[in-house]
Amino acid sequence: MSPIARLRLARAGLWLLCLTPLALLAERLLHGRLGANPIEFLEHALGDWSLRFLLLALAMTPLRALTGWVWPLKLRRTVGLWAYAYVCLHFAVYIVFDLNILEPARALAQLAEDLVKRLYITVGFAAWLFMLPLALTSTDGWQRRLKRKWKTLHQLIYPAAVLGVLHYIWLVKKDLSDPLLYAAILSILLLWRWPWPKVRGAILRARSAAAAPTSDQTLR
C-alpha cells in the first residue's frame, strides 16, 4: 500500500473514530437512555470527548517522535478541529437548554452573570475563545498567509487545554478521578515539550559562572 493510500485510510479511520461518540449519544437520545438529567449527561459527555480529542491532538507530536511515523502530524489538525467541534456542541447544549435560547435577552444576561459568578464557566468560555482562532486559521491558505506567525498563533492550544482541564476540575464537585486523570495526561504532554536540553545547558552555565574565580581571587 502506498503512503498516500495509508494516509487516506488513516483519515477515514479518524473520521469514523470522531463520529462514533456522536452516533452513540444520538442512539441513547433516541432510546431515552440519557439518565435522569439528560441535559447534564449531554453536556458532560460532549465536554469529555472534547478534552479527549484535544489531548489526542497534543499527543501526535510525541507519537511522531517516539515512533518515527509521519502520519500523526498529518492528522493532528483534523483531530484538533474535531476537539473544537465537540467544544462547540458542549457550549451549544449549555446555551440552548440551560440558558433557554428562545429568550435571547434573558439568555445573554444569564450568560454574563454566569461568566462573572461561576469560575468554571469563565475558564471554560476562555478555553473556547482560545480555540476559536485556531479553528478559523486551520486551513492551508491561512497557514501560507500567516507563515511563521501561524505556528505562534497555534500555540494557543496549550492554554486552551490547561483551561479546559481546569474547567472540568472546578465543575466536578465529588469524584475528581476523571479530571485529575486528564490533568496528569496533559502534564505529561506539556512536559514532553519542555526544552530540557536548553534548561540543562542554562543550569550548567550558571553553575560554571558561579564556580569561576573572580578577578580579585585570581590576583590573590
Image (cartoon, grey):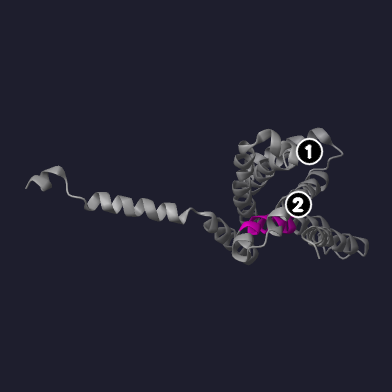
Q: Nearer the viewer, residue 194 or 64?
A: 64
Q: Position of residue 87 (x, y in %)?
A: 74, 49
Label 1 near label 2: C-beta < 8 Å?
no
Q: Residue at x 62, y 39 (%)?
A: 153
- Distance from disc 2 to disc 1, alpha carbons, whole Å, reads 32 Å
- Residue at left 67%, top 62%? 69
Instruction: Indicate the secondary structure of the residue bearing disc 1.
Output: helix
Q: Is residue 133 magenta?
A: no
Q: Disc 1 marks which amino acid?
A: Ala
Main SS of the magenta part reads helix
Q: Which residue is mark 2?
A: 78
Q: Residues within 10 Å of mark 1 (few under 14, many from 20)?
A: some
Residue at the disc numbered 1? 107
Which amino acid, mark 2?
Answer: Thr
Q: Is residue 116 left or right of residue 201?
A: right
Find residue 106 and report its horizontal and vertical position in percent. Answer: 79, 35
194 or 182: nearer the viewer: 194
Is residue 14 at all visible to an observer of this figure?
A: yes
Quadrant assignment, res 114:
top right
Residue 173 visible in rendering: no
Q: Secondary structure at mark 2?
A: helix
Q: Quadrant of the N terminus?
A: bottom right
Q: Residue at x 80, y 46 (%)?
A: 92
**Above or below, comparing residue 102 to residue 39 in the picture:** above
Q: 65 above or below 100?
A: below
Left/right of residue 140 with respect to residue 26 in the rendered view: left
Q: Position of residue 218 (x, y in %)?
A: 12, 47
> Which residues lie in the magenta part?
47-61
Earlier in the chain: of badge 2 and badge 1, it is 2
**Which one is in front, 127 or 150?**
150
Q: Picture coordinates of residue 161 (x, y %)?
A: 63, 51
